[in-house]
Image: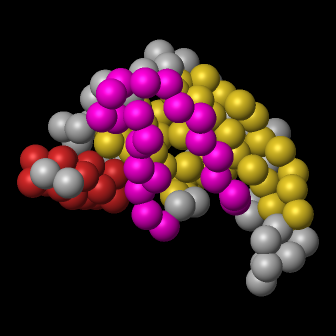
Amino acid sequence: MNRRLLVAIAVALMVGILAMPALGLAAPSQCPHFSCTDLTSGGVTPIRCPNPLNGTCYNVHWTTRSETDIVGFNVIFLDCNKGTRTQSNTFLIACSGCTDGSSQSYSFVATQKPNDHLRYYIEVVHVFGGTTTCGPV
């Protein structure tokens, strides 16, 4: 990896951690919808959790249209009643097509069950540190 890309990743992670934007919620239990040109939602599918978790997990799917200025992704779990957001992934999910701008499909295994007021969103992390929230998935 070149130095410029590593610096961009570090800045993107810092921006995501230090400057998580507040989401304007219309009413309790009503989750906002963010349209994105960066990706399309593939939905959330219940699956059997891998060991050692066991039980039910949730496979979060999405597909990018093009990855020209993207470093990676975060999976965000939003509680619309409380207005809280939690990053589900520990580390940035690196983009697969960021070197050639191609479309790619992704999935992430999560443990929290979505419902009317608990939803998954994808946060797109851009090369120069900005983010775009997309969803709900």
Q: Is residue 78 above or below residue 38?
A: below
Q: Is residue 137 left or right of residue 46?
A: left
Counting from the top left corner in percent of width and height, residue 94 is at 41, 50
Residue placed farthest to the left in the image?
3
Is 65 a magenta residue? no
Q: In percent of the image, x 87 and y 51: which residue is there?
A: 46
Counting from the top left corner in percent of width and height, residue 109 is at 69, 58
Residue placed farthest to the front in the image?
100
Magenta stretch bounds: 90-110
Q: Is residue 23 visible?
A: no
Q: In percent of the image, x 18 and y 48: which residue is there?
A: 5
**The C terminus lies in quadrant:** top right
Q: Is residue 43 visible?
A: yes
Q: Nearer the viewer, residue 35 or 95?
A: 95
Q: Is residue 114 above or below residue 132?
A: below
Q: In percent of the image, x 53 and y 61: which residue is there?
A: 89
Counting from the top left corner in percent of width and height, residue 12 is at 26, 49
Is 108 a magenta residue? yes
Q: In percent of the image, x 75 and y 60: which residue is there?
A: 112
Q: Is residue 16 above or below residue 132?
A: below
- Label total for image: 0
Q: Is residue 24 left or right of residue 110?
A: left
Q: What secondary structure is the stretch in magenta mostly built from?
A: loop
**The N terminus lies in quadrant:** bottom left
Q: Quadrant of residue 105?
A: top right
